[in-house]
Amino acid sequence: QVTLKESGPVLVRPTETLTLTCTVSGFSLSNAKMGVTWIRQPPGKALEWLAHIFSNDEKFYSISLKTRLTISKDTSKSQVILTMTNMDPVDTATYYCARIRYALFDPWGQGTLVTVSS
Amino acid sequence: EIVLTQSPGTLSFSPGERATLSCRASQSVSSNSLAWYQQKPGQAPRLLIYGASSRATGIPDRFSGGGSGTDFTLTISRLEPEDFAVYCCQQYGSSPITFGQGTRLEIK
């Protein structure tokens, strides 16, 4: 069974850097043509794709957030890490990770709510 | 960037009825790379349909997807109580990947 679980801080102060970890099970981050993606959803708003990383370490970023995002993976720990710098209250959202397989996001983790506030 | 518009924002139906949801793209979606997700409160989105019309594993056959180019639909042939949720479309054929705002299906 494939599962993903997000972890990270619940509260972040403005200007701080957010670090989120996605721990996967049921598949390997070294599997060909598989990857992990990050998506966020502000309260009551639409889903927004952030970044993804593939087994060959190829990375893609949202153009609007590219300067603030870094995605990486630790295959031995089955973890994908997303960092977002210079956090702002508008970045308050539920952050999800999901497996990418044949370009499809499936399944998703349960998500983690991150609030940005002083 | 392809903008996906789902309207209306909310639809009201009774259990047992047929519901059709709309997703319109601002430009043609490459290779009909259009997916639909179901999202319930406090839960992660669940993939229902991909490639515009293919059901994901384990999805009941009362869910069907259709359309091509810029106009896509999700049809639920006979609504069950557990189908009342938010439905969101996503295009994954062009970068950046984009999502629609979602349509809430509520019980009339």
Image (cartoon, grey):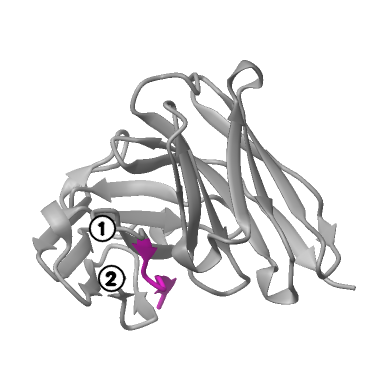
Asked whether, in this view, residue B50 is left or right of residue A74, the answer is left
Indicate the position of residue B103 as horizontal and vertical percent values.
38, 73
Q: Chain of mark 2?
A: B
Asked whether, in this view, residue A16 is left or right of residue A97, the answer is right
Q: Residue at x 17, y 62 (%)?
A: B29
> Which corner quadrant of the image does residue A32 belong to?
top left
Indicate the position of residue B88 as horizontal and vertical percent values.
37, 64
Residue at the top extreme of this rendering: A76
Magenta stretch, overall SS: strand
In the rendered structure, which amino acid carries the disc numbered 2?
Ile
Label 2: which secondary element: loop
Residue A22 on the magenta span: no
**Range drawn in magenta:** B98-108
Residue at the left extreme of this rendering: B68
Residue at the front extreme of this rendering: A67
Quadrant containing the C terminus of chain B in the rendered view = bottom left
- The reply to whether label 2 and label 1 mark residues of one chain is yes
User: Residue B2, which numbered label?
Assistant: 2
Asked whether, in this view, residue B48 is left or right of residue A3, the answer is left
Indicate the position of residue A34 as horizontal and vertical percent values.
39, 29
Quadrant containing the N terminus of chain B in the rendered view = bottom left
Q: Give the residue pinned by disc 1.
A: B94
Indicate the position of residue A35 as horizontal and vertical percent values.
44, 33
Q: Chain of mark 1?
A: B
In the rendered structure, which amino acid carries the disc numbered 1?
Ser
Q: Are marks 2 and 1 in contact (CB under 8 Å)?
A: yes
